[in-house]
Amino acid sequence: MQTGNLRQGEQDMSVVVTSVFLLFALIFLGFFIGKRKIVRQESIPDLSNLVLKVTMPVTVFCSIIDQRDGSGIGGSLGQIFVGILLMHLFSAVIIFLLVKVLRVPEEEHGVWIFTCVFSNNGFMGLPLALSVFGSEGMFIMALGNVITNLLIFSVGIRLLTWRYPMKDKLSFRKMFVNNINIAVVLGFVFLLLHIPVPDVLDQLLSYLSNITSGLSMLVVGLSLSRLPFREVFREKKIFLLPVLRLLVVPLLVIGGLRVLPFEVDPMVCNILILTSALPAASSQSMITEQYHTNTSAAARAVFVTTLFSVITVPLMMAVGLK
């Protein structure tokens, strides 16, 4: 039994290391491309727009309609939705207090809170959930991503534009009516009504969806290429971000799940823990590029949390998973 657990742990570690390596390779490739001027700096916001307005909505739509087996969707849906909402809410409150205590510069408050609240549960979480927990785990992770995407492209945009002058006022409608959230609604309509997607259209959507992960990490690297490499680590406080994102938040989630007075589906608990343990969502680089806010701080946050996640994700999984 112990040998089986050991082999499973080694397999999980291998999956995490491979995922982090691939993400990092793409970041460094983007950094190299930017430094060599293969892609001009003026083009980076255009690439961000391509991800946010075209390929990422397609990815979200596909991740929902691909979950064709809706058996037991009711219980899992309710538990994961409530769990994700509460996890984001309590993380935001705690991190908001900590950035005050740590005296983080005001113009970086939004990036710090976004980093600690929203994880890379799409590009990194879905393949990890599939590898470690199988199709059921990936399905529940995809359900959780629905709420996360709604929050990222509404509340998250507000955080990343916080304390920055905006040419156009960020209205409630602009926060919630966007391509990502429209893709969420359409995805659930197709899923729940069992609307078939023609094969040719399905292939086209798959091609576009497959672009998202790689291109988003390239944009992170391109954003970093604007800085001298030593500038990435210039701010010493930046090393507190991996501690908060990768250790404090998941340990709080693990502790909270263990003291709950009622029963929660073990798979839902595992997905919540995995979600909380992942590095920062790379979408913040695209959002800051689009709105011309703190792109360097956002890129550094993604970089350092992804760097240290190769150690912390297996550790948190070993501590918390059921």
Image: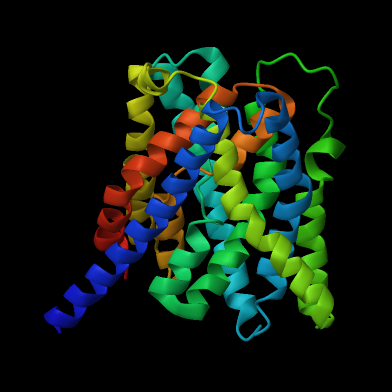
Is 78 positioned to the left or the right of 127 in the image?
A: right
Residue 217 drawn at (x, y percent): 54, 44
Task: Identify the residue shown where x is 66% and y is 67%.
Answer: 63
In the rendered image of this protein, does residue 298 appear above or below residue 62?
A: above
Residue 32 drawn at (x, y percent): 49, 34
Tell which of 219 and 37 is nearer to you.
Answer: 37
Tell which of 93 and 191 is nearer to you.
Answer: 191
Tell which of 284 and 268 is nearer to you.
Answer: 284
Residue 209 drawn at (x, y percent): 68, 61
Task: Identify the residue shown where x is 38% and y is 52%.
Answer: 21
Q: How many marks?
A: 0
Question: Does the image show residue 252?
Answer: yes
Which corner quadrant of the image does residue 163 belong to? top right
Is 314 positioned to the left or the right of 128 in the image?
A: left
Is 321 positioned to the left or the right of 107 in the image?
A: left
Task: Identify the residue shown where x is 53% and y is 38%.
Answer: 30
Question: Does the image show residue 197?
Answer: no
In the rendered image of this protein, does residue 112 appear above or below residue 100?
A: below
Q: Quadrant of the N terminus?
A: bottom left
Task: Identify the residue shown where x is 60% and y is 38%.
Answer: 219
Q: Quadrant of the C terminus?
A: bottom left
Picture colour scheme: rainbow
Which corner quadrant of the image does residue 69 belong to? bottom right
Q: Residue furthest left?
A: 2
